[in-house]
Amino acid sequence: MMNVGSTHPPDCDTVPQTFLTVPEVAEILRCSKKTILRRVSAGKLPAVKDGGRYLFEATAIRTLFVARMVRPKSEGQTMFPVRRPHAAASNSTD
């Protein structure tokens, strides 16, 4: 319980430093504002409702963005596989 006359601020580790708005998150994730609101409603995007607007922790959005980045599975694998012609295409006759 916090003392009324306490001069100690709230625990800074539990208070996020930066909040983002729906348009800012939509720009970062490169999708529409409507998509952001649908993801919030579906519970797929963490948000805090402040009055009539949603706010998002910048660190949570960054973590989500980085976690969804596509990476090669191994050192020798490229992100974009080389397309090889089908064997059937080489057997065609003119």
Image (tube, rainbow, N blue to C red):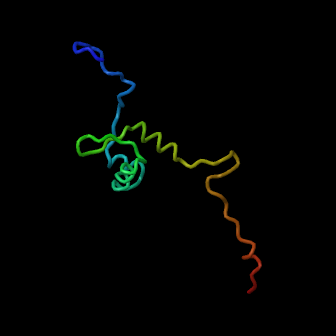
Give the quadrant of residue 34: bottom left
How many tags in the picture?
Answer: 0
Residue 10 pos. (x, y %): 32, 21
> What is the residue that sits farthest to the front in this orientation?
1
Residue at x-position 42% and y-position 38%:
60
Residue at x-position 62% and y-position 53%:
79
Residue 5 pos. (x, y %): 22, 12
> What is the residue that sits farthest to the bottom in this orientation?
94
Q: Is 94 or 54 nearer to us in this picture? A: 54
Quarter of the image where the N terminus is located: top left
Residue 49 pos. (x, y %): 29, 42
Residue 18 in the image: above or below residue 92: above
Residue at x-position 39% and y-position 25%:
13
Residue at x-position 41% and y-position 46%:
45
Quarter of the image where the C terminus is located: bottom right
Q: Is 24 or 11 nearer to us in this picture? A: 11
Residue 11 in the image: above or below residue 41: above
Residue 23 pos. (x, y %): 32, 49
Residue 80 falls left or right of residue 2: right
Residue 30 in the image: above or below residue 7: below
Give the quadrant of residue 6: top left
Residue 48 falls left or right of residue 80: left
Residue 11 in the image: above or below residue 35: above
